Every structure is written in C-alpha cells, then in structure tokens.
Amino acid sequence: MKHSLPRLILTASLLFVCAPLFAQKGVDLESELPPDAHHLKIGDAAPDFSLKGVDGKIYTLADFKDAPVLMVIFLSDHCPYSHAVETRLLPLVAEMKSRGLGVVAICPNNPEAMAIGELGYTKYGDSYDEMKLYAKEQGFTFPYLYDGDTQTTAKAYGCLCTPHVFLFDRDRKLRYMGRFDDSRFAETNTVHSTDARNAVEEMLAGKPVTTAVTKPFGCSTKWIENKVQLIQVNEKMYGAPVVLESIDAANVAALVRNNTKKLRLINVWATWCVPCVQEFPGIVSISHRFANRDFEVITISVDDPKDEAKVKQFLDKHHATVPNRVQRSLKAEGRRTNNYLFTGASLDALMQALDPASPGPVPYTILVAPGGKIIYRHANQIDAAGLSAKIVDQLGAYYSPSKN
C-alpha cells in the first residue's frame, strides 16, 4: 500500500486531467499536445519506434513490414472508452488478419501522471506490469507496447487520447487517423459509423479512404508534464478537513438499508486493531479511486468514545476526506460525513445492525448494493486490489446506455 497515500487524494480537483477529450471543430489539435510533440497529417510517414511489448520483446515498425495495412492504435488499461472499443477491435483483428491487416497497440500513458480517480473503471493502472495482466485478461491477439516512460512514440504520432487510431498503407503513409468508431459504449447496436473498419476495407481494396480524418474521443493522454499539476493538487488536498461524527446502532442500520443509488463499502475498524490500521490506506484509496462513480466508503470506528480526538487524528493522518462528489450526495441525505465513531455500549448491537452474519471481530467490511442487499462481506484485513476488482465488476468497466 505504500503508493496509496500520495495518489489517493488526486481525484476530484483533477477532472481536467481525467475528463474525456473530444477533438472539436475549430480546436487547434496541436495545442492539446506537449510542445515537443508532433501532429501527423494525412500522407505523412509512420514514425518508427522501439518499444517493449507485454511479451518482453522489443518491437519496431520493421516487425510489421509484411502487413499491407498497419493499424497503430493507442489504448490504455484504465479508460472506459478504450475498454468499449476493444470489444470491437478484437473481432475486427480476427476477421481482417488473413486479409492483410496488421495491428499494434501502444499504451502512451505515464502512470505517475494519472490521478487515482481516473482508475474507477478498471482493475489495472497503466504501468507495464499491469499492462501484462490486462492484455492477458482481455485476450489481446496483437502486440501491446509500453511508451509511458519517455512517451516519445506518443509525441511522434500526436496521440491525443486513448483510443486513437492511425492507419498506414503498405508504404507506411498515413491514410486514416481519428476514432475507431462513433460509440463510447460496448454495445454494438450503439455504433452507427464504423470509421476505422471502413478505412481498412477501402485500403485493402486499393481505394482512397473516403473519410480520412475523424475526431478522436477518449481519455486524455497522461503526459509526464501532468505530474507537476498533480503535485500542486496533492498539496492542496492534504489540507482538506476530516469530519468525524458519532453514530448509534439504529443509524448504522439506516446506512445498511442504503436508500440511495450508490454502492456502499462499510468498514468497521479501530485504532488499536493492527490489521485495521494496516488496511486503512487501502480503504481510503478505494474511496478516492471510485469517487466519480455511484460509490462511497463509510468508516465506523469502535474505539472508546472518549478517544474521539485520537480517532480524528488517525483519520487526518490518512487523509480520510470525503470526495467532493460524494459530499454533494451526503447533503441530499442530510448527512455531513462518512466517518463515524460508534458510541453505543453493545458491539453486538452494532454488528447485528450492520450484518447479522458478522462473526464479530474487526476489521469487518461489507459491500451494500442500493436497496440494502449485502453482496460482499469480509472479516479481517482486506486485499485492496481484489476488493477493487469486485467493485469494478459491480459498477462496470465501461460506459453503458443502461447506466447513467
């Protein structure tokens, strides 16, 4: 968990980094790139690269010399737009490989330039090691290369976001660039313009590409330069106040009933409990990781009520602030915080209100769906990565027209 605290607070104020990027009419695309980046134009030669793939091999353009048409597509592990496109990219590759389509995917993002709030749709970040896991899990049938340390290839291609598609002919001249298609959703019935597929078909048929440039949309490239902005936001967020309030068994039961649209993670802990203290950075990290989803973390301390100052000090130390988006939802519920100190005499009453199936000891953690159904329960210390994966499974890994 040693990386959790520096990253966990980089969330609500970083929407300018996290937000999807749309190349809009009238926008100078080059202004969206670092000063030393290049914006390719139709007819330009494909910039060469030398990048490590998830299989450990180093790839260059020469490795794809036999492909009449080469797709260079920038993808990422974390982005819901990328996730959706991949559900259609894999079938396209399977269909077109025998006809001469070569594909290489590149992750352009620097992991240290990414706010934790941008990881709310994924089990994985964009580090090289996580790319290996992601590619295997997704069943990638093409090389997946890492450019995050130097980003020289992303700059050479002018990668604005993930996904971003570039199609080159046999002479490796650019013939198409832009979006994969016109849908941000995974559902195929939401696609109305199969732009990259159309361009591939025309190129394989030896025809000019009818629509050579489209507007890419997706998650903005996480440039190394963003780290400076993250540090500034980090410093600001460290000073955010933590609010601690008392709670009784009746109000715990009300929280578990969960009359909201949010998935709730409720963690019972104490400052004197070693596994509680060890897992707490992961709990706070999860709170900020999913802050932009319909999700919240509620902590309930079972310390002696006389030790309120000690509990508050611990929460402050671990920056257990309530993310801005969650704060707005609390106001609608008539609450001020998600950090509580249990003041009742009976811990049995607390656990009965929380979850009658609880064995009793702390730490104890439950996931409560809207309407009050407990869909996950865990006694003892959590595995933050494993729990994050369960949360993604519940919330979904990409945008969907059925989920607002």
Image (spheres, grey):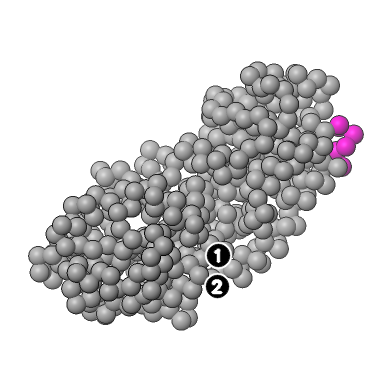
Identified at 59% across, 68% down, the residue is: 227
Q: Is residue 381 left or right of residue 116?
A: right
Residue that numbered label 2 is attached to: 225
Which residues are the magenta region?
304-309
Q: Earlier in the sequence, mark 2 or mark 1?
A: 1
Q: Position of residue 332 (x, y in %)?
A: 62, 37
Local crowd size for mark 2, using a 10 Å CA cut-off: few (<14), some (14–19), many (≥20): few
> Residue 113's mark?
1
* Number of disc labels: 2
| Above or below: residue 383 compared with residue 119 | above
> Residue 365's mark?
none
Pick the quarter of the image with the C terminus: top left
Q: Is residue 225 left or right of residue 74?
A: right
Label 2 to label 1, Cα distance in Å?
7 Å
| Viewer-side residue, 394 vs 111 | 111
Local crowd size for mark 1, using a 10 Å CA cut-off: few (<14), some (14–19), many (≥20): many
**Residue flagged by tag 2: what amino acid is it?**
Glu
Contact (Cβ within 8 Å) of mark 2 with mark 1? yes
| Viewer-side residue, 305 vs 136 | 136
| Viewer-side residue, 327 vs 178 | 178
